[in-house]
Image: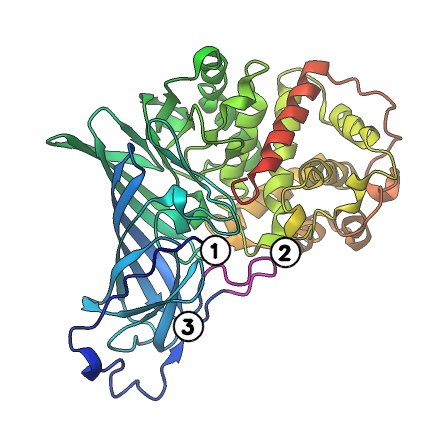
Amino acid sequence: MLRRRGLRAAVATCGAMAVFATPALAGSASPGAPGVGDPYYPEAGNGGYDVSHYDIKLRYQPENDRLRGTTTIVAEPTEDLGTFNLDFALDIRSVRVNGEPAEVTRENATEVKVEPKKALREGSLATFVVEYADKPSEVEVDGQTPWKHTGTGAVAVGQPQIAEWWYPSSDHPSDKASFDISVAVPNGTEVLSNGKMTGRSAMGDWTRWNWRMPSRSATYLAFLAIGQYEVSGKTGAFGQPMVTAYADGLGELRGPAKASVERTPEVLDFLSGFFGEYPFESQGGVVPAEGLGFALETQTRPVYSPGFFRIGSNTSVVTHELAHQWFGDSVAVKDWPQIWLNEGFASYSEWLWAEHQGNGTAQELFDHYYSAHPAGDEFWQVKPGDPGKQDLFHSAVYDRGAMTLHALRNRIGDQAMLRTVRSWYEQNRGGNATVDEFIALTERISGQQLDGFFDEWLFSSGKPQVGETTGVPRAAAARSAAEPRAVKQLDHTHRMLARRHNAG
């Protein structure tokens, strides 16, 4: 459970005489739901309003992990609201709603209820200004904190939750918003975040770094990396700004990390040939020296654990996280059971890249993973189409997920597959989607009834049988013909990617 020091609730200046709703709305205003009802995380996100923008201003002292912040949330109520919730785990100093002090009650470790002086009218413009201060690494929920205090700063990267440890939000992929992120740190400390750097200014012994992400993003895809970094700016693919950063202390891993992440433009150019136009306005990558045991597709600028480069350069993980920019970031899940839409596409993209690099065909990689798991293996008990909360990042979601897409490609043919993937992205770009919607699109484009196919590959326990009905036209090879190092790299990558659950 959360170690709390006690909430500093904001108190309305008019005390007991405060009026919490306008007369016109007093009878009709309702409380906003504390969550959006996600099947795996029911209290994630909040009902009653949609966020359009986060303006996050922070001051961070790496020496003692002290974070002070003011986050302004721009939102539109979707009903008349007498109260609403925020997802946040740190100590709050005050909340103002439309400029006026509001009453605040902590309901549990990550849920805060806010009662404004005046009820919020449906469709109106609302602003929530939250001031807070805490030591994020000391705030634990269920024994975990995804905020990692490092020797020179911090890393705020996690899935499915991270926002609660550095900014208040409606923390669910279904509520996307644009971001301005501004962080003041002691001179000589670097701050990396999403989008484009809009400025950097000195203030005595402190420097403020400003980042802007205009494209709407899910809350867990906003990130911070603070510390000692070698930061490089250049022109990347499609003439866009590209920012890469490598932490001091990477040692012998600095070379292979650079040899991998600096190929970002090449990989993006390759992927865009399959999927369509790159969704965002900037690109790059960050490699911290510590505090992270996985990689994450943080929007516009993935973050990679140095562990991915222990066996040498690793463009597989770079391809995986960059494919997520299309599938996972631009086209986000409507709820967490849809995770196959993220991980299946990203993992299959690794196979396409391996084939492009001459390290084994997609069919050979299918054969490898299919034959690597005998029929009785627990691997085949996880259903990628609805894996359950505990198996959200199970290796089957990645590898069986990729196998599903390759089997589908064999079933409907290359042209129908390409049309399906590109149409899926174009129709859902910037939004949210479900597996059922993908199945419906696939059936419409291919002209085939595919219920049985998807049921066997995504929604059933047990090893699917290869053959015409499952989309694989020949028996899987007993031994893969794929280049051994490529397979080893893919296996290493997926073992590390599976560690990301709750920033574990």
Was residue 40 drawn as part of the magenta stretch in this picture?
yes
Amino acid marked by disc 3: Gly
Residue 32 is labelled as: 3
Residue highlighted by disc 1: 172
**Circle 2 or circle 3, nearest the eye:** 3
For the point 59% across and 36% down, which residue is it? 499
Does the magenta stretch mainly form a helix, a strand or a loop? Answer: loop
Q: Which residues are magenta?
A: 36-45
Residue highlighted by disc 2: 437
Tell me the distance, in whole angstroms, between the alpha carbons under discs 2 and 3.
28 Å
Percent position (x, y) of residue 212? 29, 41
**Circle 2 or circle 1, nearest the eye:** 1
Percent position (x, y) of residue 445? 68, 49
Was residue 124 drawn as part of the magenta stretch in this picture?
no
Percent position (x, y) of residue 213? 33, 42
Q: Secondary structure at mark 3?
A: loop
Amino acid marked by disc 2: Glu
| Residue count near mark 3 (Cα–Cα under 10 Å), binned few <14, some 14–19, many ≥20 | many
